[in-house]
Image (spheres, grey):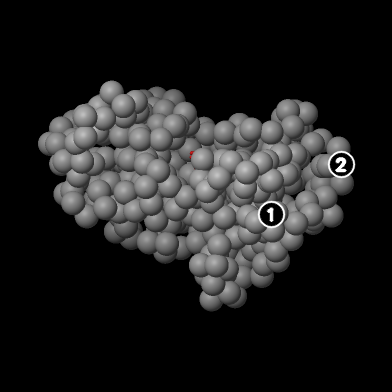
Amino acid sequence: MMPNPFSNRDIISTLDFSKVDIEYLLEVAGRMEDIARQGSRVLANKILASIFLEPSTRTRLSFDAAMKHLGGQVIGFSDWDKSSLKKGETLSDTLKVVQGYSDILVIRSEWEGAARYASEILDIPVINAGSGAQEHPTQSFLDLMTIQRERHRLDGLTVGICGDLTYGRTVHSLLPLLVNYDVKLKLISPQQLKVRREDKMLLESKNVSFEEMEAIDTVIPSLDVLYMTRIQRERFRSEEEFLRVKGYYVLTSSLLKNARKELLVMHPLPRINEIDPSVDVLPQAVYFKQPRYGMLLRMALLGLIFDAF
Ligand code: NCD
């Protein structure tokens, strides 16, 4: 058997992982449903510190649930203004203290590079749960798992990614995973929110077939996956800039009239208005399945980091 590539490893960027690593993770994640149902004690002596300096629902709760399904404990805070950071303590001091109480750190921050920085100053493994507009690797692992579990393959698929391709960290983390597969990408965005230059360079260097476009209606019939994203209001330089693209895309059930039956409509959530609730009842909508896959994926990741399986 291949050695566990996640043993004691930091999870900062999807760029740090090879296709072999990713498939190893997905394979283990595929075995987590039974463990979640039965419960496990493999992390009984471990404490996860969860430090969320930006809003979160799914990511924080699913790390929490994942750790508990494996018998571990969770400490931390998400209301940073009640922590000593509010008094002016540096992030670095806070993290060094938290390290003394825990075996692994999960951190979300608006600062790009915060998770990488934490991994450099701490000895315990660090998981990036979102670093500004930069990366959100565990979201992208679960997105890939969703496609794999719902479509049973990744090769040969046409994947549309729609919305805020500039500031969306889940997009920026998903592309380095998709380039490992034989996919065709349709990058759908307003002019102002096109995919970043470095992402385009990555796609070009890996010879991935991609097309940038603004219209969503004409491309829908050709898609196997449609990954919708929220316009990242909090990352814009000004409110005026945001207002120009607010509500730019609204996916409705009538827009999906000519979609493939097997299309997967995905969204990392939270959605604001980019997917109309009329889509929720369609068989193509899998965005409420993604969070469950996310918890299973995070169980796999935590167990592997601690070499517990
Ligand atoms: C995403 C995030 O925080 O980047 N949410 C999530 O973790 N599922 C997406 C978003 O906020 O738009």
Res. 277 in view: yes
Q: Is residue 276 left or right of residue 41?
A: right
The circle on residue 257 is: 2
In the rendered image, the vertical position of residue 129 relative to residue 38, given as above or below: below
Query: Please, what is the three-letter code of the amino acid marked with disc 1?
Result: Ser
Spatial distance from mark 1 to mark 2, Cα to Cα? 21 Å
**Count of numbered badges drawn on the protein:** 2
Q: Is residue 195 above or below residue 50?
A: below
SS class, disc 1: loop
**Within-10-Å neighbours for mark 2: few <14, some 14–19, many 20+:** few
**Amino acid type, mark 2:** Lys
* Residue at the image point whose x is 61% and y is 70% from the top: 208
Residue 74 visible in the shown view? no
Residue 110: which quarter of the image?
A: top left
Give coordinates of residue 71: x percent, y percent.
28, 27
x and y, in percent, of residue 206 in the image: 55, 73
Quadrant position of residue 179: bottom right
* 201 shown above or below 222: below
Residue shown at 25%/27% (left/top)?
A: 83
Q: Quadrant of the C terminus?
A: top left
Judge depth for marks 1 and 2 and give the one in front: 1
Q: Which residue is mark 1?
A: 189
Q: Secondary structure at mark 2?
A: loop
* Foreground of the two, 178 or 234: 234
Q: Would residue 7 appear left or right of 270 to someone viewing this image?
A: left
Tell me which residue sits at (63%, 59%) in the image. 194
Tag of residue 70 = none
Residue at x 32%, y 57% (from the top left corner): 5
